[in-house]
Structure formats: structure tokens, C-alpha cells
């Protein structure tokens, strides 16, 4: 089968997400909302405007805020039960990737009574009915979960196994940069680097097509321009707006085109040392770009370097050095030892990398030996 582009989510570029949420629900007969969020969002006061506006509009709301980072099926089921008991017609996700992934799973379960999530994720059951509509409102500019048709939930052992299906797409995503104004610089930089790496890997991936190229290059252009500003001057709303939009746009590109070697190594690396995902993909960008450089054609490079505002004389071999400086300027580490990598673990990590789904999508095919060598060089 050829490469496909399918993106059904209604995107709202917003400057008042609570108002836009109420507006969207006003088109629906008798909506009842399950609002999924986490404790950090509640204590930061971010949920309040939503609750106030929904109450003023007479929309019943069931709030569920007990969603941890990296949710497992045990974390999803209570959210599902709360929404089911309340008779919810819509699931609203207010949070980062973990909240949005949970909401997408809850939407599937609400639409398919009796379905066992683990049966679905391990292929023992199929989706038969549509999901209930999910409205995603991201509060970080990072994972792009609001624009993908995958939800990654751990099974009862904690093993992360994604469910990929067109029914997983959010029905609506509301993108409001003001929700990210209070994110501290380190978190802004790490989540923003996830955006940039999604876009770069989607552009360089084997499944890239003319549509994903548009999204990937657009997100690269925005992240290169605005991530330093969002990191160093967090109150700049223009930068925050550009980054939350770039996260969604990069999400579309990576959802359709896939990822590459950076994310393939980042999975086992972040798991082993309990790293933030964005930090892991950031520190791995210089080594993986150095590996990829010989496989980047002059035509692909031309568009990429333009998006990155690099001079016409620059070459793919300069890409890795550029990434290293970009990351250092954000205040993030550029050596793998700085995030805890131990020499003794490299062989095992390299082996795990080759089992990651995105390993085969990289522009230049690597071996476990290549991965080990690259980690040693950037230790
Ligand atoms: Fe990522």
C-alpha cells in the first residue's frame, strides 16, 4: 500500500480555550462532559475557567483528576467508570500527553461497552463501534497527542503498548498557548525539543510524503524560531502560541510519517534512567543526526536547511553541530553521561533500540553496533 494522509480532527486556533469549548458544545444537543485532567493542572488553577464557563452554559461536568504520568490500564479504568456513571457524551482532556492519551482510551471504551482494553491493545479484540467524541486541550507544547491516532497506555504489567486506530483521533483539538505560560524554562525546553525532533524525524522518515513534508517543515521552522524565545522568555504569548501550534502540526507529521532512530533509542534510555521523554530525545539529536547525515539527499537538505535558517553553504554534516548548539543554548545537556548513561548499559540499550517500532523507519538503516558506537561517542 502507498503512503496515506488522513487527518479528521477539527483544529481550533484559540486565544480563549474555555470560551471556544463552550461554543463547540453549543452545537450539540444536551452535552454532558467528562473533564479529564491531573492534580497539577487543578492546583495551577487552569481548570477553573473551564468549570466556570461550562457551569454558566448549563453543561453538567464530571471532573476526574487522578491521572498520573505514563498511565497504565489501572489508571484508565476509574476515569472510564466515572465518565460512564455520569452518562457523559463528551470526553474533554485538559492536560499533557498522559491526560490526552487517557481521554482517548476512555472515549474508545465509552463507545464500545464491554470492551476489555488489554484485549484491544494485544489484538485479542477489535474495535467495532465509534469512540465517543474527545476534545483535547493541551497544556504543554510537546507530545502532539491531540493530533495523533495512537494512544499509549501501559498494560497491567506497565508494558507500554499503543493502540492505533482512526477512532483514536480527537474529534476536536483546541490550541491555546496561554495555557502554557507558566511552564518553567527546563520543561518548556524539553517538551519543545520533543516537537522539533518529531518534525525532523517525520521529515527524514522513510514514510514521509508530500503532505507530511509540509507539516514537518512548518513545525521545524516554528520551533527553530520560537522555542528559544518560549524557553528564555516564558511570558511571551506569541512564542507560546507558536509552540503549541507547532506541537500539533509536528504531531500530524509524525503520526502519518513515523519517527526514527532518535525516538528508538530514547524509549529504552528514558525507561532505564527515568528521564523526561523530551530530555532524552533532545540529548540524542546530535548523535542521531551525525549518523543520518550521509543519507540526506541534496534536495531534502535544501528544504530542511531553509526551514532551519541555515546558510546556503551549510551541508548535512553540519546538522549535528547545529543541533548541539541549539540544545546547549536552551540550557539542556548535550552529552549522554549528563543524563545518566553508563558505559556498562550501552550494549543492552542498543539491543532494545533495535526492537522499537520506529527503528526501521529511519532514513539510514542502523544496526545494534551502530547504536552502541553512537552512544559511546556522545557519552
Ligand atoms: Fe516524542
Image (spheres, rainbow, N blue to C red):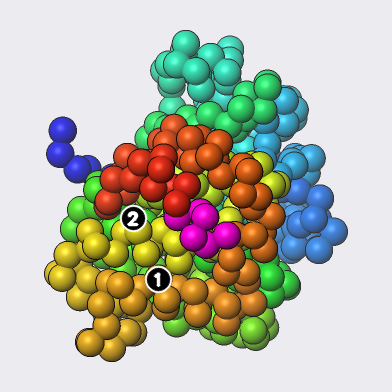
The residue identified by callout 1 is 320
> Local crowd at mark 2 within 10 Å, few (<14), some, or many (≥20)?
many
Of residues 253 and 368, which is closer to you in this image? 368
Image-quadrant location for residue 72: top right
Regarding residue 349, the answer to whether it shows in the image is yes
Residue 10 in picture, x, y percent from top left: 41, 53
Magenta residues span 374-379
| 255 drawn magenta | no
Q: Is residue 139 left or right of residue 170?
A: right
Separation of marks 1 and 2 at Cα, in angstroms: 17 Å
Q: Nearer the viewer, mark 1 or mark 2?
A: 1
- Mark 2 — residue? 202
Q: Give residue 45's position: percent from left, percent from top.
A: 81, 63
Q: Quadrant of the N terminus?
A: top left
| Point 53% across, 39% down: residue | 347
Disc on the earlier residue, 1 or 2:
2
Relative to 253, residue 77 above or below:
above
Residue lying farthest to the right in this orientation: 43
Residue at the spot 29% in from the left edge and 45% down from the top edge: 365
Q: Is residue 147 visible?
A: no
Question: Can you give x and y, in whole percent of width and height, for residue 16 in the image?
Answer: 60, 70
Q: Nearer the viewer, residue 312 or 179?
A: 312
Kind of element beneath mark 2: helix
Amino acid at each position: 500500500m502507498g503512503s496515506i494522509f488522513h487527518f479528521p480532527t477539527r483544529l481550533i486556533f484559540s486565544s480563549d480555550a474555555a470560551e471556544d469549548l463552550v461554543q463547540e458544545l453549543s452545537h450539540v444537543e444536551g452535552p454532558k462532559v467528562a473533564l479529564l485532567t491531573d492534580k497539577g493542572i487543578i492546583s495551577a488553577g487552569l481548570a477553573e475557567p473551564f468549570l466556570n464557563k461550562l457551569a454558566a452554559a448549563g453543561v453538567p461536568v464530571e471532573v476526574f483528576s487522578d491521572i498520573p504520568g505514563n498511565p497504565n490500564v489501572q489508571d484508565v479504568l476509574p476515569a472510564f467508570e466515572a465518565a460512564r456513571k455520569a452518562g457523559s457524551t463528551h470526553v474533554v482532556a485538559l492536560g499533557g500527553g498522559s491526560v490526552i492519551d487517557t481521554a482517548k482510551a476512555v472515549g474508545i471504551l465509552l463507545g464500545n461497552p464491554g470492551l476489555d482494553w488489554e484485549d484491544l491493545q494485544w489484538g485479542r479484540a477489535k474495535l467495532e463501534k465509534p469512540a465517543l467524541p474527545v476534545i483535547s486541550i493541551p497544556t504543554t507544547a510537546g507530545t502532539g497527542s491531540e493530533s495523533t491516532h495512537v494512544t499509549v497506555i501501559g498494560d497491567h504489567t506497565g508494558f507500554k503498548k499503543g493502540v492505533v486506530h482512526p477512532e483514536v483521533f480527537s474529534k476536536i483539538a483546541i490550541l491555546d498557548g496561554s495555557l502554557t505560560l507558566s511552564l518553567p524554562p527546563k520543561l518548556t525546553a524539553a517538551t519543545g525539543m520533543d516537537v522539533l525532533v518529531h518534525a525532523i524525524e517525520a521529515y527524514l522518515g522513510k514514510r514521509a510524503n508530500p503532505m507530511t513534508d509540509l507539516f514537518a517543515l512548518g513545525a521545524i521552522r516554528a520551533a527553530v524560531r520560537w522555542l528559544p524565545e518560549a524557553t528564555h522568555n516564558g511570558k511571551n504569548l506569541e512564542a507560546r502560541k507558536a509552540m503549541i501550534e507547532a506541537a500539533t502540526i509536528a504531531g500530524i507529521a509524525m503520526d502519518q510519517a513515523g519517527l526514527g532512530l532518535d525516538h528508538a533509542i530514547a524509549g529504552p534510555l528514558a525507561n532505564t534512567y527515568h528521564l523526561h521523554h523530551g530530555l532524552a530525545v533532545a540529548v540524542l539529536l546530535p548523535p542521531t543526526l551525525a549518523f543520518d547525515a550521509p543519507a540526506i539527499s541534496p534536495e531534502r537538505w535544501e528544504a530542511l536547511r531553509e526551514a532551519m535558517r541555515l546558510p546556503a553553504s551549510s551541508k548535512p554534516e553540519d546538522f549535528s553541530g547545529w543541533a548541539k548548539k541549539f540544545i546547549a543554548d536552551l540550557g539542556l545537556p548535550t552529552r549522554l553521561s549528563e543524563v545518566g548513561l553508563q558505559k556498562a548499559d550501552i550494549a543492552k540499550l542498543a539491543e532494545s533500540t533495535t526492537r522499537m517500532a520506529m527503528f526501521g523507519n529511519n532514513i539510514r538503516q542502523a544496526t545494534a553496533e551502530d547504536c552502541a558506537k553512537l552512544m559511546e561517542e556522545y557519552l
